[in-house]
């Protein structure tokens, strides 16, 4: 863990320094959310949200803007979502640093959107039907940020204990499965298959990228698999060189191996 303020740790206390970037993130989400309720700015906000126009009309910028564009209706739920973003974003920011924090949020949200848009395009082309009004609703705006920030936190702090609903203690790594469960329950009510698979992709890619920092949360990381492939390739290449050049290994008088023809 790095850049963690003294006494800050990964705890969720409301005291202590708050990175300016976290305030910026919350400010962008709240500002875009508010702009969606004014007639003059609502059309602009609609263009920033993820819609089927991303693949139907080439509105590719939506892949990068949708997760930072607030959505929903005014009420206590929005305040709760922003509070949870604040708690997780502050800790994740201190653990990753500024550059990696923004890079991961953008890359993971874009990758998740690509999966969701791909599913919507394939479904529409196969069935011949248009996209449902609820398409992408599950992963729109701050909901995608929540899914990614919680997933990143869960991987980096998999053995930490968090109070689910501020009551039930649970290890952070199980939040990954809980996110998928909650997304599935949302899918049952909205039938938003692209949004559901987009969230699954975001959580899965987060686990694949970090893998729990060394050993994976639920298995080896992609980096470990890649290193294994490299090691296998090196051994095969070495064996081929030995066979091609007729080389063998013999010990010298100093007990060091030496290549000889």
Image (tube, grey):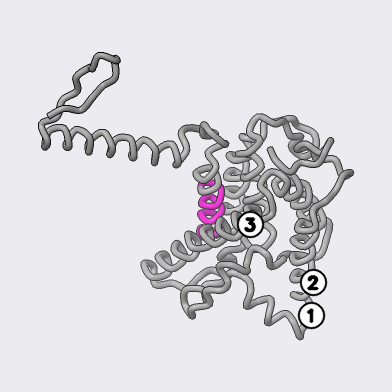
Disc 1, disc 2: CB below 8 Å? Answer: yes
Q: Along the line of sight, which residue is nearer the eye, 196 or 213? A: 213
Which region shows up in magenta?
A: 192-204
Question: Chief secondary structure of the magenta span?
Answer: helix
Q: Residues within 10 Å of mark 1 (few under 14, many from 20)?
A: few
Mark sitting earlier along the chain (3/1): 1
For the point 54% across and 62% down, the residue is 110
User: Mark 3 = which residue?
Assistant: 144
Q: CA distance from mark 3 to mark 1?
A: 23 Å
- Residue at 65% from the left image edge and 76% from the top image edge: 46
Image height check: is 162 above or below 64? above
Could you tell me residue 137's position as x and y percent? 61, 63
The kind of secondary structure element at disc 2 is: helix
Residue 233: numbered disc: none
Task: Name the one closer to the observer, 177 or 112.
Answer: 112
Image quarter of the N terminus? top right
Based on the picture, tell me whether residue 255 belongs to the magenta stretch: no
Q: Nearer the viewer, mark 3 or mark 1?
A: 3
Q: Secondary structure at mark 1?
A: loop
Check disc 3: other Cα within 10 Å, few if <14, some if 14-19, many if 20+: many
Q: CA distance from mark 1 to mark 2?
A: 8 Å
Give the residue at mark 1: 38
Q: Residue at x 26, y 33 (%)?
A: 235
**Which residue bears the numbered disc 2?**
34
- The earlier-in-sequence mark between 2 and 3 is 2
What is the residue that sits farthest to the front in this orientation? 253
The image quadrant that residue 174 belongs to is: top right
């Amino acid at each position: 863990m790095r850049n963690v303020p003294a006494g800050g740790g990964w705890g969720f206390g409301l005291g202590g320094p708050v990175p300016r970037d976290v305030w910026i993130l919350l400010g962008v989400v709240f500002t875009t959310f508010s702009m969606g309720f004014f007639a003059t700015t609502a059309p602009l906000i609609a263009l920033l949200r993820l819609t089927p126009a991303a693949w139907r009309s080439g509105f590719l910028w939506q892949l990068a803007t949708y997760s930072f564009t607030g959505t929903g209706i005014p009420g206590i739920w929005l305040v709760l979502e922003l509070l949870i973003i604040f708690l997780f974003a502050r800790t994740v920011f201190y653990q990753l640093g500024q550059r990696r924090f923004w890079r991961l949020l953008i890359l993971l949200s874009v990758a998740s959107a690509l999966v969701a848009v791909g599913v919507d395009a394939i479904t529409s082309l196969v069935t011949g039907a248009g996209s449902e009004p609820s398409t992408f609703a599950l992963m729109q705006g701050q909901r995608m940020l929540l899914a990614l920030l919680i997933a990143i936190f869960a991987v980096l702090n998999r053995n930490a204990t968090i109070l689910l609903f501020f009551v039930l203690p649970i290890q952070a790594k199980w939040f990954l499965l809980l996110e998928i469960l909650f997304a599935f329950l949302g899918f049952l009510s909205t039938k938003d298959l692209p949004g559901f698979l987009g969230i699954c992709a975001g959580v899965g890619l987060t686990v694949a990228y970090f893998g729990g920092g060394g050993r994976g949360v639920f298995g080896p990381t992609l980096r470990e698999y890649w290193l294994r492939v490299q090691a296998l390739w090196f051994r095969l290449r070495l064996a081929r060189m030995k066979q091609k050049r007729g080389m063998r290994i013999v010990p010298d008088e100093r007990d060091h191996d030496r290549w000889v023809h």
